Amino acid sequence: MTSLFLSNLTSHQTLMADLSVLDGVITRAGEALTERLAGGGKLMFCGNGGSAADSQHLAAELTGRFMKDRRPLAGLALSTDSSALTCIGNDYSFDDVFVRQLQALGRSGDALLAISTSGQSANVIRAVRAARELGIYTVGLLGRDGGALRPICDTAIVVPSQVTARIQEAHLLIGHTLCGLIETGLGVA
Ligand SMILES: O=C(CO)[C@@H](O)[C@H](O)[C@H](O)[C@H](O)COP(=O)(O)O
Ligand SMILES: [Zn+2]
């Protein structure tokens, strides 16, 4: 009998091979995000659960370091401030935890990377809708059929899988690629 690990490994490897179809859209997203950062904008991130972890991980690649030593870049995860999350969730609604922070901190010329494996998280959808209204460029890092987020993001990167864990594994690869494209696009030596 195949072990769980070998079965997961096989499905992971199959998905990884399928991701080459996303090359063009990932490159375009990287260019758009680089343009915002080069123009003085910041890159915000949001998502729930594992995607909240991805948000803070990727934001730290920008403010800290990724592959190269260079100036700190403006990355901000909207999933990490426990006081903001609990206040907004408690006093308003959990659906508002990202949108309220985005409306407080976001400016035209910024960008938002919205991460959701289903494309259906209401708090992420609200953040993307508000971002568009504020002139903030939106990239959706999605899965399954892209859900309700797919048509409302400026650029939607949809990982072709139905399995949340596999989609998240692909999201990290794509997130790291976006960080690499940003460093290269900004001409970091
Ligand atoms: O990491 C996992 C499952 O692997 C979970 O924490 C998962 O992220 C949560 O169920 C999220 O609430 C799912 O939200 P979404 O990806 O559908 O937007
Ligand atoms: Zn997970």
Image: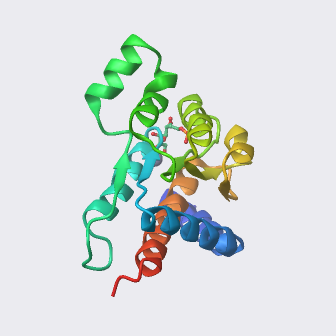
Relative side of 112 to 120, left or right: left
User: For the N terminus, which image quadrant?
Assistant: bottom right
Specify the farthest residue to the top.
91
The image shows residue 184 at horizontal and vertical percentages of 44, 81
Relative side of 38 to 64, left or right: right
Count of picture labels: 0
Q: Which residue is pictured at 51% across the width and 47% down the height?
A: 108
Q: Which residue is pictured at 38% across the width and 58% down the height?
A: 58
Image: 153 above or below 86: below
The image shows residue 159 at horizontal and vertical percentages of 65, 58
The image shows residue 126 at horizontal and vertical percentages of 58, 31
Specify the farthest residue to the bottom.
189
Relative side of 56 to 103, left or right: left
Image: 88 above or below 80: above
Q: Nearer the viewer, residue 169 or 127?
A: 127
Whether residue 90 is visible here, answered yes or no, is yes
Give the colour scheme of this rendering. rainbow
Relative side of 71 to 89, left or right: left
Q: Which residue is pictured at 46% across the width and 21% down the height?
A: 94
Q: Nearer the viewer, residue 35 or 189?
A: 35
User: For the C terminus, which image quadrant?
Assistant: bottom left
Q: Nearer the viewer, residue 163 or 96?
A: 96
Whether residue 2 is visible here, answered yes or no, is no
The image shows residue 4 at horizontal and vertical percentages of 51, 57
Image: 59 above or below 130: below
Q: Which residue is pictured at 44% across the width and 42% down the height?
A: 106
